Amino acid sequence: MKSTHRIGLLLALVFLLPAMFFSVYEISSLNKNEEMIQDIYNKQLEALLFSVNQYADDVLGNWISRTETGVDAITSEAEIPSRINDLLTYNSSLRTVFLSDTTAITSVQRFFSLDTSTVQNQRNKIDSALLQNKSLIEELIRYKKSGFQKVVVLPYSWGDDNNLQCIGVISENPPGHFRVTGFLIEPESFIQEVVGPKLQGISRDQFILSTSRKQPAGIVYSTWSRDTFSLVQAESVAKDFWLFPDYTFSIRTQGTSLKQIAQERANINMAMLISLNIILVIAVILVFQNVKKEVQLAQNKSDFVSNVSHEIRTPLALISMFAETLEMGRVTSEEKKREYYSIISKETLRLTGIVNKILNFSQTEANKKTLRIERIDLNKELTSILNTYDFHLTNKGFTHTVSQRPNVFIRGDKEAFTESIINLIDNAIKYSGDTKRIELITGVEGVHGFVTITDFGIGISKTDQKHIFDKFYRVSTGDLAKSRGTGLGLSLVKQLMDAQKGKISVSSDPGKGSSFTLFFPLE
Ligand code: ADP
């Protein structure tokens, strides 16, 4: 397996797989989490409702104790004790207060009401309630004897639609003597007057609390003036009212409902998870690409070392061989001598070329090379390079054509310009097959002046085109490409072009040839 593939697989294993597993697990447990959160939240809401119920019970407990102390203080049968009078006056939901000796639970012994017109009617109701709940009362007395006091609704069927509820508790006075202390209460006004303010206190603009009637269904009280029964039904957590089982308390969050909050949370979590995964995938791809580049670079570097060693060794061997031969004086003919000298000088030039290229490259890469950007007459400069190079081209059997657009003035560094052109012409020579022709074109495109150098050689495949400007990169196939080179030329040209605020582009067809274009900013 190639080392880059191995690294890719490793990255995927180390980063992506766990993330994917985690995401799948999280997504599958998202709903469960939300349900749990909703459950916990519901429990908290229920706790609030519990406190409301507790409050109503406390209020009633207070009324009972006030009644008891009030009654025990009076002497005359006819008067209403002042405490009970206050109780009746300030609580309009409380219609009647009564006390009944449990030894004779069918007849009310003490009876207090402010409304004398309905006295008889109410007395009959209480009588009926006590009678119908005889066994319940006996049970409550048993509770009381064991020290437990409980407020209960005494249901009765009286047969009118007056919605009064009878509530009672067993009290003991004097010791061993039990009686029922009770009230006739109008539940809806009790809810509105007594429980309502408490609900307002709890709601604090965060919750909507309401109390509803079960039969016929409807809202009796809500902390939100525009509340409707259908809204209460749809969104609330509800609990029975302990005192009046025909009524329920409901609570829900203000504005967004609990369901919506849970849904929103689920959506946000899901979106975060997906974006995290996307970021992770992108990060892994970037890391992989970087690693791949580094691995490729390391590979190229090691190729470079062996290439350059070979490149240097060949001319050195030739130089030393011919120099030795000359030194020994074995060559007698002048013609041979001249040939050997010329070989030595050619190989020395080649060596110098290679060393210069490497030095140039390292200087440019380290940003040590200072460019002198100036106005360049593109055609004039190109012609002068070609004049110098003409001999070399002809020597190699190449012909060249130049088609120039007149008056192209660019900004660039003359040395860098020459270096780039020579590199491209050298490559064109190196990578041409039998068609030994080079075409040069100058022109203007947009804000750039350009030179195109075209050969009709081996060409470059699309995949290699992406890499040929990388440092040390050499195309590995093809005998010609293998021949000579350092893999520095095009990378050097690209660096020079970047430094001159220009660019280089390539278009090539394998087997047909390549065109390299240098773009310089126009003057
Ligand atoms: P070198 O020529 O020393 O190998 P370069 O950086 O100049 O290094 O070129 C990189 C690679 O691009 C070369 O190895 C070669 O395969 C390819 N290449 C460059 N120019 C040409 C061209 N004109 N025709 C075909 N291939 C080319």
Image (tube, grey):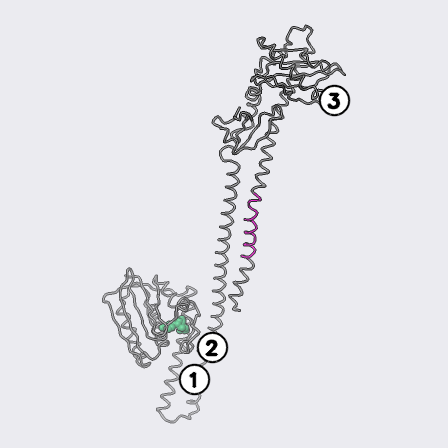
Please name the predominant secondary structure of the magenta segment in the image: helix
Residue under label 3, please give it.
142
Q: How many numbered marks does the figure carry? A: 3
Q: Tell me the CA gap for discs 3 and 1.
A: 125 Å
Q: Residue at x 56, y 52 (%)?
A: 22
Residue 341 screen position, x and y as percent:
38, 86
Q: Is residue 23 magenta?
A: yes
Q: Is residue 297 magenta?
A: no
Check contact, mark 3 vs mark 1: CB within 8 A. no
**Residue type, mark 2 in image:** Ser
Left or right of residue 41: residue 341 = left
Q: Is residue 356 visible?
A: no
Q: Earlier in the sequence, mark 3 or mark 2?
A: 3
Q: Residue at x 58, y 33 (%)?
A: 45
Residue 460 screen position, x and y as percent:
38, 71
- Helix or strand or loop: what does disc 2 sit on? helix
Q: Nearer the viewer, mark 3 or mark 1?
A: 3
- Helix or strand or loop: what does disc 1 sit on? helix
Count neighbours of disc 1 (C-alpha within 10 A) and say few if under 14, some if 14 to 19, many if 20 or more: some
Residue 365 screen position, x and y as percent:
42, 65
Q: Residue at x 49, y 72 (%)?
A: 302
Q: Tell me the CA gap for discs 3 and 2.
A: 111 Å
**Residue type, mark 3 in image:** Arg
**Residue type, mark 1 in image:** Leu
Give whichever of 338, 48 is nearer the camera: 48
Residue under label 1, please give it.
318
Give whichever of 115, 35 is nearer the camera: 115
Q: Earlier in the sequence, mark 3 or mark 1?
A: 3
- Helix or strand or loop: what does disc 3 sit on? helix
Ligand number 1: quarter of image = bottom left
Residue under label 2, please give it.
309
Left or right of residue 17: residue 180 = right
